[in-house]
Image: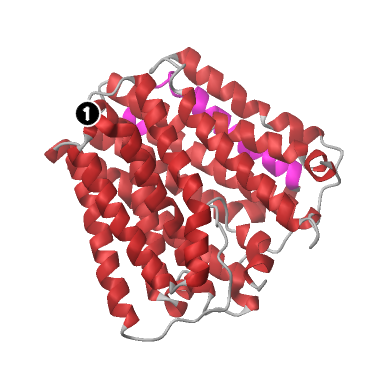
Amino acid sequence: MRLLISFAALFTSVVLLQLGAGGVAPLDAISGIDLGFTTAQVGLLGSAHFLGFFVGCWWAPRLMGSVGHSRAFAAFTAVGTIGILSHMLVVDAYAWMVMRGLSGLCVAGCYTIVESWLQAKVTNETRGRAMGIYRVVDIVGSLAAQLMISVLDPASYVSYNILAIVCCAALVPLVLTRVEQPAIPVPPRLRPGLAFRHSPLAAAGVISSGVTGAAFRMVGPVYGIEVGLSVDTIALFLAAYVLGGAVAQYPAGWFADRYDRRWVLVFLSILTIVASAGMIFLPGAAFVTAAFFGFSTFPIYSVAAAHAHDFATQDERVDLSASLMFLYAVGAIASPWLVSTLIEAYGPAAMFIFVGAAHIILIGFGLLRMRVRDAERRTRYVYAPRTSFVIGRLLGRFRDER
C-alpha cells in the first residue's frame, strides 16, 4: 500500500493521459466518418498518430535532459491538449492528421517521462510490485478510454473539449508531486538493425504486431460502422478487444516460458487467423470475436520480444527494446492507412483478410527460421508494453531472473 501511495501521482497521471489522449483515436474515427471523411483519410489519422508517437519516443529523453522531467511532461501534455482542442476549429482531414500527430507525440513523451521516473525510484525489492500496478493502471486506463466514446457525441466541440480537459488534468498530479525528480537518464541508442541481427523472426513478429494492433485500434471503429454497430456498441467492441488482450498475458507467458517461443508465435498467429475469420463470417458475434482477436494478437509483441532477448546480452537489453519499439512503430504507421484503403475498395472484410495474410506470412517465416537454428532459452517471459523506448530499463532485470 505504501508503494502505491508513493507512486500515486504518476499512476493518476497515466490514467488521465489514457482517458484524454487515448480517447481521441476512436472518437476521431467515428467523427471523421460523420463529417464525410473518406475511409482512407480516417486511416491516415491513425498513421499520423503513430508517426507522432515515434518522434515522441525519440525526442522525449533528449528534452528531459534539457528542461527536466516535470517541465518536459508539461510541454508534451500541452502539445497533446492543443491537438485535441484544435479538432473542431479546423474541420479538415489533413489538418486533423497534424493534430493526431501532436496527440501521438504527447502520449509517447509522457509515457517516456513516467517510465523514466519509475525506473529511477523503484528498487529491486519494489520493482515487481510497482510494474504490476503500472500494468494494471495502464490496462484499466486503456479500457476506460475505449468506453468513453459511448458517452461522447461524434464531431462535437464539447466532446473534444472534455477529452482536452482530462488530458490537461494529467498535469496536476505529476507537477504537484513532492517526490524529488530523478536524475536525467541516458537515452537509449536507436539501432533498428539490432533486432534483426539477434532474431529475424522476433523482428517480423513485432512488425506483425504493429500492423495488427494499429489496424484494429485505429480503424476498428470504421469496421464497426460498416457492419452496423452503434456508437455504444463500438465502445464495447473496442473494450472487449483490450480486455481479451489483458486476459491473454498470463497463459501466453506460461506457454512461452515452457515451450519453444517460435511455436508459441506460430500458434498465436493461427489463432489470429481463426479470429479474423470469425470477424468476417460472424459479424453478429462482434464482442466475442473482438475479445478472441485481442486474446490472440496482444501477446505477440511480448513473445517476440522475449525471443529476441533470448539471444541478447544483458548490456544490449535497453537498446534491443528500443529497436523492437521502432519496428513496432514502422508497422503501426503503415497499417491504418493501408487497411482503411482496402476497406474503402473492398469492404470491411478486407481488413481481416489483410491481417490474416500477414499472419500466414509470419507462420511461414517462423517455420523457416526453425530450420535455420535451434532456439535459445535464457530469459523469462515479460509482458512488454508498447509505451516508450525506455521501457527496456524497467523490464531488463525481470528478463534475467530465473
Q: Which residues are magenta?
A: 69-95
Residue in the picture at 64% in, 77% down: 314
Tell me the SS state at disc 1: helix
Main SS of the magenta part reads helix
Any part of residue 368 in sight: yes
Q: Position of residue 242 (x, y in %)?
A: 45, 40
Above or below, 349 relative to 148: below
Q: How are the colours assigned in the image?
A: secondary structure
**Labels in figure, total:** 1
Q: Is residue 396 magenta?
A: no
Any part of residue 184 in sight: no
* Quarter location, residue 346: top left
* Quarter location, residue 230: top left
Q: Position of residue 331 (x, y in %)?
A: 36, 56
Q: Is residue 131 left or right of residue 245?
A: right
Above or below, 255 relative to 34: below
Residue in the picture at 38% in, 75% down: 200
Q: Residue furthest left?
A: 346
Above or below, 367 relative to 13: below
Q: Is residue 43 left or right of residue 315?
A: left
Residue in the picture at 50% in, 71% down: 258
Residue type for callout 1? Glu
The residue tagged 1 is 226
* Quarter location, residue 380: bottom right
Give the quarter of the figure containing the C terminus. Answer: bottom right
User: As rendered, which of 287 and 93 lies closer to the eye?
Assistant: 287
Q: Position of residue 295 (x, y in %)?
A: 41, 48
Give the quarter of the figure containing the N terminus. Answer: top right
User: As rendered, which of 56 and 310 lies closer to the eye?
Assistant: 310
Crowd around label 1: few <14 · some 14–19 · many ≥20 (10 Å): few
Q: Is residue 12 left or right of residue 307?
A: right
Q: Position of residue 59 (x, y in %)?
A: 59, 53
